[in-house]
Amino acid sequence: MLRQALRRFGQKLVSRRPLEKEVYEFEFGKKLRTLDLVALGVGNTVGVGIYFLANEVARNQAGPSIVICFLVAGLTSLLAGLCYAEFSARVPHSGSAYLYSYITLGELWAFISGWNIILSLVVDVFIVVQAWILTFDIFNGNHISETQQEIISQYVPQVTAENLRYFFVIFLVLVLELQSTSWSGFVIVFRLFTLVKVLVLSFFIISGFMKGDLHNWKLTEEDYIQAGLNGTSSLGPLGSGGFVPFGFEGILRGSATCFYAFIGFGIIVTRVRKSHNPQRSIPRGIVISQLICFLLYFGVSVALTLMVPYYQLRPGSTLPEAFLHIGWVPAYYVLAFAIFCSILVNTYWGFMFRIHRRIRMMAEDNILFPFLARIHTNTYARIISTVTFGSIATIMVFFFGLTDLLHFTSFEALISYSLVALCVLIIRYQPERRKEENQPEVQEENGQIETKLQEENEENETEVQQENGGNEIQVQGKTAHAIEKLTLRRLFFPGSSTPTPLSGQIVYVCSSLLVLLLILLCLVLAHWPSLLSGDPVPVSMVVLLLVLITGITGVIWRQPQSSTRLQFKVPAVPLLPLLSIFVNVCLMMQMSAVTWAWFGVWMLIGFALYFGYGIQQSLVT
């Protein structure tokens, strides 16, 4: 009895979502073309991050080598975009890391993905609030920041005075959220504001090449001394000068921070049903939007570091302040207007809508409380959820800085992108999953559905067995697959040109082992100075891990891939998905201890909810 219960419990942890199950999708009222999807991806990705991150990364983490940081972050995001593109061509539903993980890896990993996405969306509330504050400061000559302490701190506690502006703007955003019920003309407005942002950033790039000085990429100690910033032989917090003043470690930390600027293309895969030819337009929209964003960010980082020596960037400064350095005051306000457009689009879109959508999906799958599935139809539930998550964002003001929250959002995105890359690696080698209605006969026996298909040659008779509660079936050769046994030879010579259940299980296990080995490798590489010093222990560990990774990758490479025809497939599988996972984990290792601690606390809360409620409800279904 206990053995059966444990077995059932383990099966539910890896139970997969049926492909034919409906997924909620927001109705735009019109079909989206590839151009609309590109505008959607660029508009949602080129948000407030670039206006606030560039100065911070250039000043404290990378200096002029911020261009390399954006290159690394862009390539990392592009690898993830390719994986999302394949799933959008494979799964005919509004997609997300949660859905793809549920379809491929199972319920537990889907919950981990969805639970982290919810928190990252809540963090976005605070980030948008910070953007509102900084924009108000720009248009008011920083009067909010300068006079707030003098006037308010006389009457309220210090911590409240420092954060009162956040409470005010959160209240404003919540009001706008509750009032934003009309969506007519949204696509036109979104495309218009996206065009404004692209044009203004292009103007910034051109200005940087016109007014920039290449000497800012070759700064020396004498430049610091002449500027009166450093009078000693040690440059200290200003770095070591040159193009890479903070070294390779600075590039890695800067890449992890810059990664936030590339988050946002995932919104494209939520528009599958409202797209013309989604199997083709969505992969194109993802790839093209990512390339456009990379070119913009790369150009902005080059222009910024050419216009302003990185050590002259003020802490907490924004991108428009680069124009003040060259004396272009009107351009300062033009770029501030682009920030305003970005924030306005995010507010009009209703960032709470994305939280509501994720909660509804998880509630419909019985992972969260069922009444939350009515969050879009019940006005009272919508108001309560908006106020609740707005309150969480308010609490974050007291405990976390903007940089910490940006890191956590990037951390969550890296987890989601790694899961999607793992899903692509696994699903490419799995037997094809067919829907029940495509079969000629269905018989029900002992809780399972079995169908026998009579072929002209009775020796090739197949057996159809339903899995996952009767929603999907696998077609297996009765005489061939029933006698499959795992041998050492079969690992490298499968003996079949099409995936079988055994080859699929081999890839599943090998992929899981590879993820663990890549995490260990990244942990060792995180202490790269000891590798350069020739310490035999870490060097031996790296060599051993590389040998194991190469061997297991070879086993996966020898397994037969699915022959399903798709409009887009990730090239060079299994190498590109594994490279994506490796780079993602490397960037996660650069996150602060606060980010890891907050992730651990949030996951403990999530696991308590899942194993205390979600898994029990799911076991019933």
Image (cartoon, helix red, strand yellow):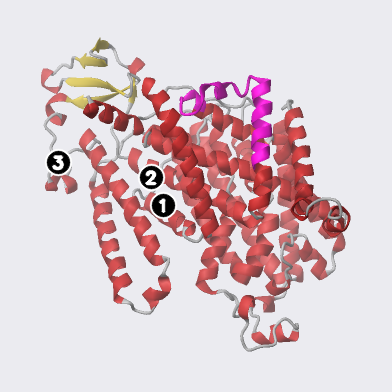
What is the CA distance from the residue labelled 2 to the residue labelled 1?
7 Å
SS of the residue at dot 2?
Answer: helix
Residue bearing mark 1: 581
What is the CA distance from the residue labelled 3 to the residue labelled 2?
23 Å
- 7 drawn magenta: no
Rate crowding at label 3 as few (under 14), some (14 to 19) or many (20 or more) other CA atoms within 10 Å. Answer: few
Q: Nearer the N terminus, badge 3 or badge 1?
A: 3
**Disc 3 and disc 1 in contact, CB within 8 angstroms:** no
Give the residue type that dot 3 points to: Leu
Q: Is residue 349 left or right of residue 537?
A: right
Residue at (67, 51) in percent of width and height:
398
Q: Position of residue 297 (x, y in %)?
A: 63, 57
Q: Is residue 163 left or right of residue 457?
A: right
Give the residue type that dot 2 points to: Leu
Q: Position of residue 81 (x, y in %)?
A: 50, 46
Which is nearer the eye, 484 or 602?
602
Residue at (63, 57) in percent of width and height:
403
Q: Answer above or below: position of 298 versus 224.
A: above
Looking at the rendering, which quadrant does residue 25 occupy? top right
Residue at (23, 15) in percent of width and height:
451
Rate crowding at label 2 as few (under 14), some (14 to 19) or many (20 or more) other CA atoms within 10 Å. Answer: many
Quarter of the image with the N terminus in it: top left
Which is nearer the eye, 347 or 122?
122
Which is nearer the eye, 4 or 105?
4
Residue bearing mark 3: 486
Residue bearing mark 2: 422
**Disc 2 and disc 1 in contact, CB within 8 angstroms:** yes
Q: Is residue 43 visible?
A: no
Q: Nearer the N terminus, badge 2 or badge 1?
A: 2
Magenta-highlighted residues: 363-392
SS of the residue at dot 3?
Answer: loop
Q: Position of residue 307 (x, y in %)?
A: 73, 70
